[in-house]
Image (cartoon, rainbow, N blue to C red):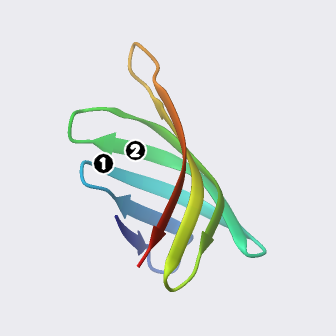
Amino acid sequence: MRIVQQTGSQTYWMQTGDCDLNIQVKQTGVLASGVGTFQCMDRAAGSVVISKMMASENVLRMNLLLTDSGPVRCIQETVFGGVK
């Protein structure tokens, strides 16, 4: 996963193998939360909500909720964590 903070803002672009997520983040203490959109190579698209995001130099953890906007709504919820 690649994460890029847009210069001078709290907007983040996250790129996974097949999907791009654009999220507007609000910091509350050491945790962050945010909302945005996602677009995938297989044409899946919809909204994304992150909560309890904690990032340091080497660790990222967040709750992630993706909701597909297609005719059949698909909701995926996971806890995501990674180490650099």
Give the mark nearest the N terminus, 1 or 2. 1
Amino acid at circle 1: Cys
- Where residue 2 appears, as percent x and y from the top left, is 34, 68
- Residue for badge 1: 19
- Where residue 16 appears, as percent x and y from the top left, is 31, 56
In three-dimensional space, the C-alpha distance between marks 1 and 2, rounded to whole angstroms, equals 7 Å
Q: Secondary structure at mark 1?
A: strand
Instruction: Point out which mark residue 9 bears.
Output: none
- Where residue 61 appears, as percent x and y from the top left, is 57, 64
- Kindly give the residue lying farthest to the top in the view shown: 71
Residue 52 lies, with reference to residue 45, above or below; the image says: below
Which residue is at a point 60% across and 62% down the rendered structure image?
25
The residue lying toward the viewer, choosing from 56 and 36, is: 56
Check if mark 1's residue and mark 2's residue have beta carbons within 8 Å.
yes
Which residue is at a point 34% across and 64% down the rendered structure image?
1
- Left or right? Give the position of 2 relative to 11: left
Instruction: Point out which mark residue 38 bears.
Output: 2
- Left or right? Give the position of 37 relative to 25: left
Q: Secondary structure at mark 2?
A: strand
Q: How would you rate the neighbour count of disc 2 (Cα within 10 Å): few for under 14, some for 14-19, many for 20 or more?
A: many
Quadrant the C terminus occupies: bottom left
Amino acid at circle 2: Phe
- Kindly give the residue lying farthest to the right in the view shown: 29
